[in-house]
Image (cartoon, rainbow, N blue to C red):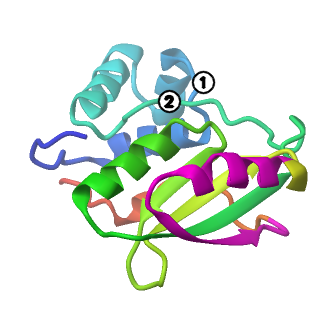
Amino acid sequence: MSTKTPHKMDRYDRHILALLQADAGLTNQQLAEQVGLSPSPCLRRVRALEDAGIIVSRHTRLNQKALGLDLTVIIQISMDRHTPERFQAFEETVSSYPEVQQCYLITGQDADYLLKVVVPDMDAYQVFLLNKITRIEGVSGVHSSFVMRKVVDTTALPLDYVEARR
């Protein structure tokens, strides 16, 4: 992440971000046409947004169900000790597991971490839980919740809160 001062954005920048959040595969030409700029200024704006650390990366979202990854699990994990070393070791370990889609250090719950995990089925989850999660040093409690239906599933940020410069 960038430690620079916040990048002031105008309506073109916000429009560029909204379009790229919806379809990161847009070419610069397509993006420029949809934003209402010529390609060169559009590309300069995209590069400035990247340089400012606002555009971090671009991804292709895959259809989880079409790939046979039918089970999404939300896991609350408690740690035995709250030390920087224990947390760092846990975070490094779960970061290496491709099943873990998101990991948050949280407060306000009995748990220390909240994970979103994707696996094919309950058998695969049992193997993941017993052979990976419970073997991480310091894990003292695990509570699993199984997603029945995704009501909202987006990676798009709410750009209406971003102030426009005049």
User: How busy is the neighbourhood of tag 2: few (under 14 within 10 Å), some, or many (20 plus)?
Assistant: few
Figure check: 153 above or below 101: below
Q: Residue 72 falls in which quadrant of the image?
A: bottom right
Residue at the left extreme of this rendering: 5
Residue located 45% across and 61% down the image = 104
Give 35 or 147, whichever is nearer the viewer: 147
Do the residues bearing badges 1 and 2 touch, measured as CB atoms within 8 Å?
Answer: yes
Q: Which residues are magenta?
A: 124-149
Q: Amino acid at mark 2?
A: Arg
x then y, percent, for residue 153: 68, 58
Mark 1 highlights which residue? 25
Q: Amino acid at mark 1?
A: Gly
In the rendered picture of this protein, how many numbered marks are placed on residues? 2
User: How busy is the neighbourhood of tag 1: few (under 14 within 10 Å), some, or many (20 plus)?
Assistant: some
Q: Is residue 36 left or right of residue 125?
A: left
Give 2 or 69, whichever is nearer the viewer: 69
Q: Is residue 154 visible?
A: no
Give 160 or 146, whichever is nearer the viewer: 146
Q: Is residue 123 left or right of residue 117?
A: right
Mark 2 highlights which residue? 58
